[in-house]
Amino acid sequence: MTIALTIPAIRTRIKGAPLGWVTSGLFLACFAPVIYGLIVAWLTIPDAAHGILIAPVAVWLAWKSGVIADSQPARWAGAIIILVAVVASLFGRVAGVETIPRAALFMALVGLTLWFVGWRQVMAWWLPFLLFALTIPLPESIIASMTLPLQEIAAKMGAAMLSWRHIPVLLSGNVIRLPGHTLFVSEACSGLRSLTALLSMAILVGALFLKYPLSRILMVALAVGLAIFVNGIRIFMTGFLVFFVDPKLGEGFMHLTEGYLLFLISLSILALLTWLFLRVEGRFGGKANA
């Protein structure tokens, strides 16, 4: 909730305004290329595509919550964090490691918040900061280490479901062999994209609608499990359609459409879970108040 600024708070902000504007100008001069590169990454990297939606939501949440009236700027802490962020950004750009400048951008935003409105405001904006952190693309090494296990899980789940439907299956790593057909669970089919998107949505809806920390933690855990399970169903559906209908259904536009459809179903299930959690919280919360 936005609280009107008091006269002392306004004086404090005006007093530090000149140096604050200089700090903001230096921030933009240093991080403008990083911001541009991050937007390009959201638009071009499939695993980071959720950022183009989540980042504006984070900004809107920060704007809506407003500024705490009696918050005190933490000049020294803000200045130190901004300085470290600038040095890290320059080092990352020179070294050619894109993740470092992007993480430094996050640090600099925290530092600017400390500079202008202090620690209480950083704590009040925990959700926007967390959502923005989730939009930063992961390093390739981490993506690779996560992709292979997810591919194996999806292949095992898909093969098990196909076998349950009495379809002859031979699983070899990420390769599912059917009579006359071979399915390869590629990196794009690992489910990492839907996992990151559903994880961000679970954190968002949990923070906005659920009251208790336990409910929010369970929501995030269920979102992770849901993403993995639905991706296994996607592999099963692909094998089922390839075996019984047409091998062309396992590639191209139809395969892509199938992925989007299952992701929409995942979002619907996430909305249903949110509704169930709200019902449970309302029932047990009412008993606790009674």
Image: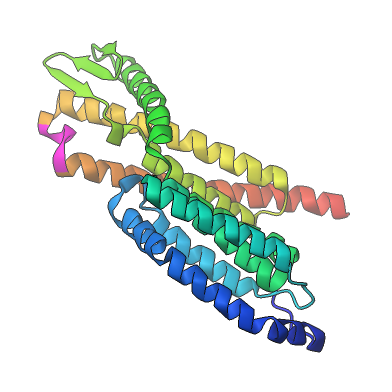
Q: Position of residue 139 (x, y in %)?
A: 41, 40
Q: Residue at x 43, y 34 (%)?
A: 142
State left or right for residue 77 relative to residue 169. right
Q: Residue at x 63, y 55 (%)?
A: 207
Q: Is residue 117 above or below residue 191?
A: below
Residue at the extreme right: 290
Q: Quadrant of the C terminus?
A: bottom right
Residue 74 visible, this angle: yes
Residue 135 visible, this angle: no
* Residue 251 covered by magenta stretch: yes
By secondary structure, the bulk of the magenta-drawn segment is best described as: helix
* Residue 244 covered by magenta stretch: no
State left or right for residue 19 relative to residue 106. right
Q: Position of residue 155 (x, y in %)?
A: 33, 22
Q: Residue at x 52, y 68 (%)?
A: 59
For the image, the number of numbered tags is 0
Q: Which residues are magenta?
A: 248-252
State left or right for residue 157 relative to residue 256. right
Q: Position of residue 201 (x, y in %)?
A: 50, 51
Q: Residue at x 83, y 50 (%)?
A: 287
State left or right for residue 20 relative to residue 156. right
